[in-house]
């Protein structure tokens, strides 16, 4: 019965997101397309965090670092393409680019490289120490980009125009929306296959009892590091999309409060469910959008709502929707 409710919920959600641009046009609210594009992007970042939080048991307060790296890569490449200057001249000449097929993979790769570097050090710790070291690395990157005057410093950097994709006009909000939806859908499919694989079972085993997994002969550090890198790469892709959506990037994308916001999305929707973070992102951003219409102190009202969810929906909103324990699969 739970699987039936889960499948129905996923199907209804997918149909809603597919029909959203049409619904927005019929309702005379084209702004909804922009709002839900943002929801899809943050949902992608939240799903990537859920991979290592919900399945790997790795509580990170630095996930926004990879989100911001992906966004900055897109803007920096675009800026050099517009200026006609080289990004690097040694050891090889690297020019800027406004093409999504160049900028987005670059954002994913550089976010993954940063995740590999941070993860290789952070994963040597555990518990509160892991939380604090990921927070420290994220704040280091935040202040690094604040100091980069060549790329706007604290003021950030603007994207002159959205990236180009052959056959797709990203400047059209509804087409960009479907690109974001496709990116989220593909990453969800990949994540589902990943957690159901042998790799996913090892990661979940590490969450439950890493010492036992080591005694069984698994190189737990390598498995957890790969999970950390994949999560960072997913956040990098989300960052590339948010740069195109807002056409502006600032160091604020890397601040620890942004990591906390993504973490709340995961907890609100349902940790360890993959689809729960999508619900969490939608609920959090919609509540924020609705309350901010009436008061600038909307967070005062959001706080009690989060407390109620934690008290009465311990498996997250997605767990309440589908019933049962709300776990993936």
Image (tube, rainbow, N blue to C red):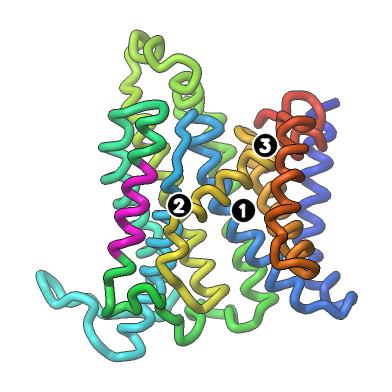
Extent of the magenta region? 134-144
Image disc number at residue 63: none
Does 135 appear in magenta?
yes
For the point 81% across and 58% down, which residue is it? 16
Q: x, y percentage for residue 69?
A: 38, 61
Left or right placement of residue 161 versus residue 145 in this view:
right
In this rendered view, identify the residue nearer to me: 311 or 90: 311
Residue at mark 1: 43
For the point 40% across and 14% down, which residue is it? 213
| Crowd tier of the residue under label 1, counting other residues whose Cα lies within 10 Å: few below 14, some 14–19, many 20 or above | many
Mark 2 touches mark 3? (CB < 8 Å): no
Q: Determine the CA span between mark 1 and mark 2.
A: 18 Å
In this rendered view, identify the residue nearer to me: 33 or 262: 262
Q: Earlier in the sequence, mark 1 or mark 3?
A: 1
The quarter of the rendered structure image containing the N terminus is top right
Left or right placement of residue 120 versus residue 295 in this view:
left
In this rendered view, identify the residue nearer to me: 225 or 121: 121
Residue at mark 2: 256
Image disc number at residue 270: 3
């Amino acid at each position: 019965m739970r699987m039936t409710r889960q499948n129905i919920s996923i199907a209804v959600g997918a149909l809603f997101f597919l029909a959203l641009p049409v619904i927005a046009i019929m309702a005379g609210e084209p702004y909804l397309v922009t709002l839900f594009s943002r929801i899809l992007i943050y949902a992608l970042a939240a799903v990537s965090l859920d991979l290592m939080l919900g399945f790997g048991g790795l509580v990170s307060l630095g996930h926004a670092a990879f989100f911001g790296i992906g966004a900055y890569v897109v803007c920096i490449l675009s800026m050099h393409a517009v200026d006609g200057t080289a990004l690097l001249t040694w050891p090889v000449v690297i020019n800027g680019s406004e093409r999504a097929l160049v900028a987005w993979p670059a954002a994913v790769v550089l976010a993954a490289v940063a995740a590999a570097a941070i993860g290789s050090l952070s994963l040597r710790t555990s518990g509160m120490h892991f939380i604090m070291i990921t927070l420290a690395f994220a704040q280091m990157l935040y202040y690094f980009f604040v100091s980069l005057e060549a790329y706007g410093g604290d003021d950030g950097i603007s994207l002159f125009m959205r990236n180009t994709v052959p056959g797709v006009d990203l400047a059209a909000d509804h087409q960009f929306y479907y690109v974001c939806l496709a990116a989220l859908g593909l990453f969800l499919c990949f994540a589902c296959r990943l957690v159901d694989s042998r790799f996913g079972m090892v990661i979940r085993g590490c969450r439950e009892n890493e010492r036992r997994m080591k005694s069984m002969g698994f190189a737990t550090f390598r498995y957890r590091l790969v999970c950390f890198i994949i999560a960072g790469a997913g956040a990098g892709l989300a960052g590339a999309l948010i740069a195109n959506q807002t056409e502006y990037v600032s160091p604020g994308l890397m601040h620890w409060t942004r990591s906390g916001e993504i973490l709340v999305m995961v907890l609100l929707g349902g940790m360890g469910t993959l689809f729960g973070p999508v619900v969490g992102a939608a609920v959090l951003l919609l509540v924020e959008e609705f309350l901010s219409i009436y008061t600038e102190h909307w967070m005062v009202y959001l706080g009690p709502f989060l407390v109620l969810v934690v008290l009465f929906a311990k498996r997250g909103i997605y767990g309440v929707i589908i019933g049962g324990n709300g776990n993936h699969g």
